[in-house]
Image (cartoon, rainbow, N blue to C red):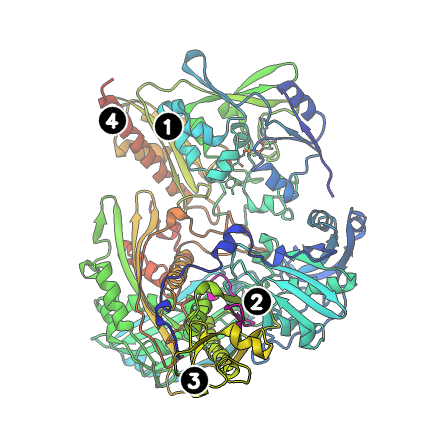
Amino acid sequence: MSRSASIIGAAVSRIDGPDKLTGRARYAGDFHPEGMTYAYGVYSTIARGRVVSIDTQAAMRCPGVLDVFHHGNFPSLHRSPASFAEENVVDEKRVPFEDDEVFYAGQFVALVVADSFEHARAAAYQVKVTYDEDTNTVATLAQAMEKRGSTHANDSERGDPEGAYQSAPHQVDATYTTPVETHNPMETHTTVARWIDGKLEVWDSTQGVVFTRNTLSKVFDLDPSRVIVHADFIGSGFGGKLWVWPHCIATAGAARELGRPVQFVLPRQQMFTTSGHRPETSQHVRLAADNDGTLLSIRHENVNSTSHVGTVVEACAGSTEGLYKCDNLRISHATSITDRGTPTAMRAPGAGVGLFALESAMDELAVKLGMDPLELRRKNFTDRDPGADLPYSSNHLLECYDRAAESFGWSRRTPGVGSMRDGDKIIGWGMAACNWDAMRNPCDARVTLHDDGSASVHCASQDIGTGTYTVLAQIASAELDLPLDRIDIKLGDSTFPHGPISGGSWATASLLPAVAEAARAAIDKIKEYAGKAGSPLADADPNDFVYEKGMVKDGHGKAVSIADILKPQQLASATGEAHTGGAPDSGYSFGSFGTHFVEITWEPAIAQLKVTRVVSAIDAGQIINQKSARNQVEGAIVMGMSSALFEATEYDERNARPVNNNYAEYLVPVNADMPQLDVILLDHPDYELNEFGARGIGEIGLTGMQAAVANAVYHATGKRVRDLPVMLDKLMDETE
Amino acid sequence: MRQFEYKRAENTRGAVHAHAGQASAYLAGGTTLIDLVKLDIMQPERLVDVNRLDLADIEHSDGGTLKIGAMVRNTTLAYDQTVQTDYSVLSEALLQGASRQLRNRATTGGNVMQRVRCSYFRDGVSPCNKREPGSGCSAIDGHNREVFAVLGTSEHCIAVHPSDMCVAMAAIGATVHLASADSERAVDFLDFHRLPGDTPHIEHDLKDDELITHITLDAPIKGAGSTYIKLRDRSSYQFALASCAAIVALDGDTIREARIALGGVGTKPWRCKQAEAALQGASATDESFKQAAQIAMEGATPYKHNAFKIPLARKAIVRALRDAAERARRSAGEPT
Ligand SMILES: Cc1cc2nc3c(=O)[nH]c(=O)nc-3n(C[C@H](O)[C@H](O)[C@H](O)COP(=O)(O)OP(=O)(O)OC[C@H]3O[C@@H](n4cnc5c(N)ncnc54)[C@H](O)[C@@H]3O)c2cc1C
């Protein structure tokens, strides 16, 4: 093997950067097939009830209008089985326009197609819908639990959590709640669909071209080979674009009915209704510990909001089973139905909000014990996953604690509430652990060596903005011993060799081995050709062949280029293919670990809260690209801070309509909110997971951030905020 | 397609002439108007573009006042030398509003005339007395944390007037100059915006055949210090939860004159004359500032989610007065 190691782990700039900067990179909405038409939705203004009538007369008379679709005239379609194994997951089970029922505000009730976007929108405003409204709406999780109760989803238990809790000297019993958060990628959901000869071709802003292909093939009852899905570039997704949502089906259906391509772009407002969100959660945590801090019992019991048209379980306790050593544990998950759109995965689903609860409770326990919160965590560290009852393949959490604490200056922390000051400001220091599963999925790849000395890589996975193009180019460059600029990475096309969805932080761990193996297969192929009749090396012993820098050498040092090997065979290229599997069943549990240390300032005189400093240390295996990895962790930290301080989709409690459905009112941090960020990447390869030792890095940085912020806020103010986000009104004294 | 006519006015006369008599809207920077037209909330049949009008100057005029043309952009106004030295409260207020891109477009006239940010006004479907007089106010019992008032509200509307610039102007003292085809008139800035009362759809004292041509600021108070404190959840690009424009002039440690105006809490730019009166002759201490803040917020009505704005506004007032007084002290100490 001729792997040139230096490029792995290097700080390589994105290979797609110039294309993105110059506008050459084409996103779904940039594809304009011949004869394109434009669709605009009409969305339910009520949350629950029935459509009594849809008057489309005025809309049909508007200029440029081609048709108005609704439940009365839309073709009947099939539901997707929503199976992960079959790769056709949908979170919203209902197909658009199935019937006259309305399950949430923002549900599609009609789709107007016209010759321009402006004509379609203007006509959509003219569609008159009358409803029979059920005004007894359930707008929030609290209302849902009260009126409808909850449905058990799953649980797991070890030891005797109740008994151990009762007999322990120290207990914490608290409920934490987190609001709905809405994925707000810059690029809203976009679909361009066209039908040619009974084949459906779709350009979609999706995190999974294969899943989208399979889902559409189920919905339209087509052989998967008759559906092609493209996603060359995605303006990010954060989990919101993992599965197919109603707009995609509506667009493809309309294109079939009209016999013309249709483009649909979801308006920003509807990002808050019909394309998923992080569900609202209520998490009951009970911890018990001995006097020395040893955890004796952990319980983490959760309910999250879901919808009438899809059951989504937020695995809040996903990290709780395995993060700490504790013999007595119970976790459970349940759902409760609100009259809102269907939730879905949002970056770091489960642990993203789950560790807010667990790591806040750990802080509360530390306060009760009078123990340093870092010490409490060290005390309960485990290098075995007690949930899976397996050793971790590689767990350097203790080193994360040491290095982050050192860099942050944690030893200078004085534990008293409000004891650290800077003039008029109170300083708070808090910390929390972070954790994410290290997953790996089966993946196919094809690597082709061309006679011009270049190579191409094909895989039906996609780059959602995280740097997948770049890390694959690095691996191909290393394996093929070719410069980066001779490597062409092709992703985002469902006709390529089967690849996984870009989610769960598993893209890198899954794709790298497949690409490397396919590269080696391509090298073997070229060596095979080198030994064939007519080859300049035909007389040499094939066992001596060495591949190096795009050349094959024989035992005497005679080097022949790929072109010269291929030519006599009348071939333009040599191809290698590979299939690699999921996480090996090797007796290990795989996870990534880390910690955040956060400094906040609170100025009581003007009620202003700021996160001023974050030091994070992350153990995510071998870092393949220092730049893109750091970028992922920094982005996740900011998103976690955003979740801690700002993000919440607010619904009107009377009618379940989202009220802050735009970028001006749905708050995320702006530049001026940015703290000083210091990200330490540990870089210990985990060779049990794959040959590169790489685990994923996209999500872990978000987990634990909210708790680290809330714990720092407690340290400064003495206020324990258990309901996110931590807004200034929650910190003001009632007596002021 | 909703059709509208577009007219580009070349002079004030032409503008008011084109505007009068039908559902028209002047198009200045467009940062409020275009947004609301796209949302189908404002449905003008005619847009009268006033960008060519000769109203983009900032000039000194009689008695030390400053005359600001209606088409002066927010960015230009904020960085104007005179504004920065004589009316720093205005410059600070402008620079804490919106974003740079928006400020580059937004005009003085448009800013005064900007519409409320209430989500029920903007969603096009909820009952809203501004959008559809008589239909009711959804905000009173709805989600009402951010852009909802505690002062000047009525049972018909509780939306905040969202401008930062106007708060500074209310504190400084200003006059709005209006022109119609054949006459001109001047309105005290504090009387220009209307309280919602039972007619929340009538937002200001501007007649159909009138145009704001300019705004004059009162002469600056000699030796005064001023500042604008804007409190909000994130550090920029958010409307005020509570804000305060304060101007303080001192005689030694005694307050000679003080001005207080509030944003984020009132249904119009909110001047606090009683609190100002209480400060006159008082010593410039936190004690006095707190008392003034108390007076300013007397009679405020909290709603379900915005009760915190009452203490928050008091904090803004105290901090703004303290900083303004400090600046007055410093400038008094400076050699002239
Ligand atoms: C996302 C966002 C955030 C914002 N944040 C803030 C903020 O933090 N603080 C803040 O203060 N503002 C904020 N704004 C509002 C912004 O300041 C206003 O939109 C802007 O000042 C309006 O000026 P314009 O010239 O663009 O007005 P236009 O949109 O052109 O006009 C607005 C209205 O005024 C009328 N009009 C314009 N000129 C005249 C005139 N000469 N005479 C009579 N009528 C006239 C128009 O007909 C229209 O009805 C924000 C806006 C946006 C979109």
The x and y percentages for residue B36 are 61, 41
Please state the quadrant of the image where ligand 1 appears: top right
Above or below — where is B267 with respect to A49? Answer: above
Disc 2: host chain: A
Q: Are marks 1 and 2 on the same chain?
A: no
Q: Which mark is residue B330?
A: 4
Disc 4: host chain: B
Q: Which mark is residue A584?
A: 3
Mark 2 highlights which residue?
Answer: A492
Marks 1 and 4 close (CB-CB < 8 Å): no
Q: Main secondary structure of the magenta part?
A: loop
Q: Quadrant of residue A94?
A: bottom right
Observer-side mark, 1 or 2, equals: 2
CA gap, disc 1 to disc 2?
Answer: 54 Å
Marks 2 and 3 close (CB-CB < 8 Å): no
Q: Are marks 1 and 4 on the same chain?
A: yes
SS at circle 1: helix
Mark 1 highlights which residue?
Answer: B88
